[in-house]
Amino acid sequence: MPRSILVDNVSKSYRLGNAQHGMLRDALMGVFGRLFRRRKESSERLIWALKDVCLEVERGEVVGLIGRNGAGKSTLLKILSRITEPTSGRVDVTGRVASLLEVGTGFHDELTGRENIYLNGSILGMKKREIDAAMDQIIAFAEIDGFLDTPIKRYSSGMRMRLGFSVAAHLRTDVLFVDEVLAVGDIAFQKKCLGAMRELGDGGRTVVFVSHNMATVERLCKRTILIGDGRVKQVGDTRAVIESYLNSFGATRKQTLDLGAIQDRQGTGAVRLHKMELLNADGSELQVFHSGDGLRVRLYYECMKDVSKLHFGIRIYTTLGVLLTDIHTWSTGQAIPLASKGQGSIEVEIDYLNLMPGTYVLGVWAGSNHEWLDVLENVTRIEVEPSDFYGTGRGIESRFGLMFLPFRWSTADDGETNAASETGHRANSLDANGQAPDPLSVCQAGGTVNGVRTNQQATTVESGGLARDGTTAESLP
Amino acid sequence: MHTKWLSELWRFRELVYFLAWRDVKVRYKQAVLGVAWAILQPLVGMIVFTFIFGRLAGISSDGIAYPLFSFSALVLWGYFSGVVGQTGQSLVANSNLITKVYFPRVALPASTVLAGLLDFSIGLGFLVVLMTYYVVREEQAAPNWTLVWVPFFLAHLILLTLGVGLLLAALNVRYRDIKHVVPLLLQMWLFLTPVVYPMSAIPERFHPLMALNPLTGIVEGFRACLFSGRQLDPALTAISLAVTVIVFVVGLLYFRRTERAFADII
């Protein structure tokens, strides 16, 4: 494929310290100073926003550009857009270029919506006849019918953003650079924006797309570049690059939690939980939570005295304190019949973490016989990242609801599962018959699985793997 | 190198137009008097100067009615001083565009020079009205074939304005206090140019010095076109044009040399 963008050993430095623009009188004073005495050592520092960046993008590719704040993404885009020049190296871009670094660039409050469409479009590089041709579509997309001839100073901020995005969405250039301007407005409009972005990418256009929204990057881009500290850290398949990017955050998180240090706890204290480990389904140390992944939690505790029928539970709350689920041994009748004084541990394996991407709070408890022994409400926060759970390249996004379910669709005639569901969910554990548990049937009303009656309103997934003793239900405190 | 730059500017010609259109529209959107503002400045200048210089100080105006004499130059001066100030600020005032979008940066000064032409033409229109008034009253001879040179002097004025504007705009990005210097500069410049007084009022020995001021040649030349009986001094015109071209080239080169760093400094 012919090459569209070439970045050849580009570096960009900025001088810190003195202001970039000064005063004429200072410049003149500087001249006199140099004549009459030695110049003081400059207190300026040089920082490299980009260092030796080399990239190639083919025509028609949609490439993601991700990295932490301050990594150099916007600087790279500015250099690619010819807004600023590299300190060294060169850039070569073939074709007509448009940059979308901001929504509504050039908008003037006194002008009407219609006038601003011309102004903004022209600033972005559209010719008047192109704007005329696309005018109806721009107006329709922005959903501001009827307000076109009002000065935009009367618009709400949402209307302004929609108008700005709408003009940009109708750019028809060969190469497009987009910097985190997506997803403005309400959910419905965000959907439209996403669709427009996808269309822009589909048209055979080369797009470089900078975003912090990993799910969108995963959806739109096949290839992604990771930038960190001004250098290219990784280039390649989007999923892999996003993983290593997210992992770079996770490395700083403690996945082994010292519960003993937590003061804020309730209960009699007959049992004391002192450590909690969060692990992957295969027991390896967990790096990042993804929606739909399996999760293993290991609890270490100490009994101050002998306790009978000891139960444990893990609670997952939203950040607002809504209890989403309480996973405990009582549901499966798996209490520890007699826990003797001393150390002990117990483990729970969750098949699918059916949480939407977002932040959650974990709590943990131990109890027995109508009594709370140790309750910790707020142990840690976890970040669940979006994932490609269904294996189709389309992520799970929090806008799909509060939770998600594993599922597969089929039509009445074939009764076979369609191809998409073959990769539909990842089975992390097998039941007693060596078969992957069918979550759908588990969740059905009133069903009985493995001798334990399921709760009709189950939104939790039962843990598998541990033997069941079929004891009768005991009441919870 | 220069041809590539020119062809790119040509590609962005519509942007120059839209930016000028924006400035004009915005200025007139909330203006109560609308187009009257365009005439007001030279008109008020004419009235004030007529009173001070024509009546009080009794300065002659080479046989031409003083209001007409001064207004003819004040309309030129109004364009020059107004646009030079705006052009000087054009980059800094549009810093949000410069840091977010690519376009040839010269489009901004070019747009203010273009936008100023609207008010300028209104002023010229009023000059025609004024001229007609005096001709009808037989206080002034009707202009003759020399009128054909008017476009030349107008183009000359625009070239000078653009040259000075480019230089100031580029300087302003780097040295922000330029904008305080400009009004002072213009104030001096007004009195160094024979706008409100005729050149004949200045002793001969200073004439070569005055010729170095490109506006002198423009103003005198313009008057020579309008008022039959005035001689057009070719030497003056030539010197004036030469200085204008030098100013333009210096301004353009300095602008081009510094424009790469605008987005970083601004």
Image (cartoon, helix red, strand yellow):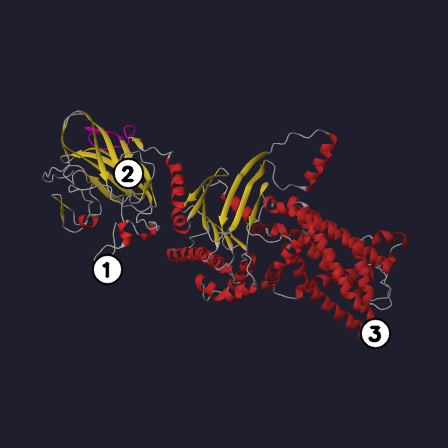
Q: Which residue is mark 1?
A: A411
Count residues near mark 3 (Cα–Cα under 10 Å), then give few for <14, some for 14-19, many for 20+. few
- Report, in whole angstroms, how far the alpha carbon at label 3 lies from the one at label 2: 98 Å
Q: Are marks 3 and 2 on the same chain?
A: no
Above or below A88: residue B199? below
Return the x and y of residue A402 as percentages of the image width and height.
Answer: 29, 49
Q: Which residue is mark 2?
A: A362
Going 47% across and 63% down the picture, which residue do you hit? A138
Residue type for callout 3: Glu
- CB-based contact (under 8 Å), mark 1 and mark 2: no
Going 64% across and 57% down the picture, which residue do you hit? B7
Specify the segment rendered in magenta.
A259-275
Residue type for callout 2: Leu
Q: Nearer the viewer, residue A33 or A351?
A: A351
Q: Nearer the viewer, mark 3 or mark 2?
A: 2
Q: Which residue is mark 3?
A: B138
Return the x and y of residue A170 as percentages of the image width and height.
Answer: 48, 60
| The stretch drawn in magenta includes residue A271 | yes
Q: Nearer the viewer, residue B40 or A45?
A: A45
Q: Nearer the viewer, mark 3 or mark 1?
A: 1
State the residue lying farthest toward the front: A1
Tell me if B51 is positioned left or right of A362 in this view.
right
Chain containing mark 1 = A
Chain containing mark 3 = B
